[in-house]
Amino acid sequence: MMKIRDVSKHFTVKKGSSLSRTRQIVRAVQNVTLDWDLGDFVAIVGESGCGKSTLGRMLAGITPPTSGTITLDGEILGGARGGAQRKAFARMAQLIPQDPYAALNPVRRIKDLFYDPLSYHKMVPRGQIQERVEELLTMVGLNPANVMNKYPNQLSGGQRQRVVVARALTVDPKFLIADESVSMVDVSLRIGIMDNMKAISRQRQLGLMFITHDFRVARYIAQGGRIAVMYLGQIIEQGPTEEVLKQPMHPYTQALISAVPILEGREQRVSEVLPKSYELTGVVPHEGCPFEPRCPLATDICVKQAPELEADPVIAEHLVACHFSTPREMVRDLRVTSA
Ligand SMILES: Nc1ncnc2c1ncn2[C@@H]1O[C@H](COP(=O)(O)OP(=O)(O)OP(=O)(O)O)[C@@H](O)[C@H]1O
Ligand SMILES: [Mg+2]
C-alpha cells in the first residue's frame, strides 16, 4: 500500500533581469493525500501545468517532496538508508515517462536498453538476460525478433511506447505510473496500448496510475477504479470513476467534461467553456480556492477560505473541494474511439 500524505512540491523560480530579479514560488503540487494499493487503477486528470508529472515523479521516488510523506508498506520513500534498501525501494514504483523519445537512449539498440536495469538490479543471471528481454517485449505485444536489434528511431511511435512500458517492467515493480502514455501515440493505436497495460497490471496485481489530460482516456483506464482531478497542484475532486464522470460535483470537473467534444472535430478548449481564460502558471492567486479566478460560482468566501476536500453526503468515497459544489448530471460520449 502506498500512502501519500499532505504531499507538496514547491519550486522557486527566478524572474526578471539580473538587475531586478524576483523569486516566485511555484506550488506544483499542494497537500495531496491519496491511498493507492496493489490492484488499484487510478487516473489523475487535469490541464497542462496542474502538477501531474511532478506528482508522478515524487511517487516514483525521482523527485523528493518539499513537505509531506510518501510511504510504501509503512516505509518512508526517500528515507530509506543503505544501498540495498534504496535499490529495493527504487524498484517498487516505476515511472513510464511522458516522452518516449527522451526516455530511450538514441544510440543504443533496444535490447541494450534493458541490459542496465536487469544487471544493476541483478534481476536474472547474466546468461538469461537475452531470454528475459524477449519475454518482456512479448509481454507488451512486440515481436522481439523484429525490434531487439533496432535503434529507438527505427521504431514507430506505438512500438516505442511499448518498449518504454516493457522497460519499466524489467525490475518487477509493484506500482506503475504512466505519464500521458498514449498522448503521443496515434488515436488508432491507443486502445491497444491501454488494453495491454491494463492486462499486465491485472495479471501482476500492480497498482496502476495513469496520468492524462483526457477524460476519455481516464475513463477507459480507470473503469471500476478511481479518478482524481487536479487543479493548480491540488486534488479538487476524487472518487469512483463512474460517479465522477456521471455526476461531477466541482465546477472545474464539470467544465473539463463539457470540453470533451460532442461530435468529432468539435473539440472545445477548456478556456472556451469557462468564463475567463487563464494560463496555469503554478502561482496560486490567494489563500482561498485556487479555482476562484475562473469559477462561475465564486463569491467572497472563495477568496478568503480554501475549501477542504470533503466527502459527499450520499457517496462517501466521492470527495470534492468546493464551497458550492453541486452534482451535475453530465451526458457526454466519453468513448476513446470517438476522438
Ligand atoms: N523543475 C521545475 N522547476 C520549476 N518549475 C517547475 C519544475 N517542474 C515543474 N514546474 C512547474 O510546476 C508546474 C507543474 O508542472 P508539471 O510538469 O507537473 O505539470 P503537468 O500537469 O504534468 O503538465 P503537462 O500536462 O503539460 O505535462 C508548472 O507550473 C511547471 O512550470
Ligand atoms: Mg506532465
Image (cartoon, grey):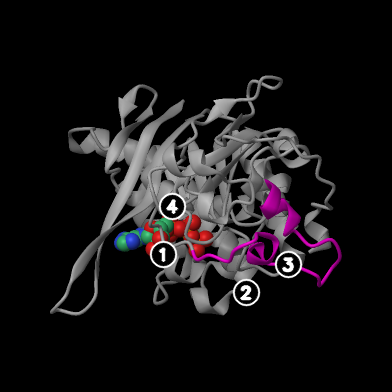
Residue 122, image x and y in percent? 33, 43
For image coordinates 64% across by 35% down, the residue present is 325
Q: Describe residue 256's horizontal placement relative to residue 107 as left or right.
A: right
Dot 1: what SS? helix
Marks 1 and 2, how far apart at CA: 18 Å
For marks 1 and 2 on the same chain, the one whose residue lies earlier in the sequence: 1
For marks 2 and 4 on the same chain, the one whose residue lies earlier in the sequence: 4
Report the amino acid beneath label 4: Ile
**Quarter occupied by the C terminus:** bottom right
Q: Which residue is mark 4?
A: 129
Is residue 85 found inside the magenta-colored segment of the image?
no
Report the amino acid beneath label 1: Asp
Pointers 3 and 4 in contact (C-beta within 8 Å): no
Q: Which residue is mark 2?
A: 156
Dot 4: what SS? helix
Is residue 267 found inside the magenta-colored segment of the image?
yes
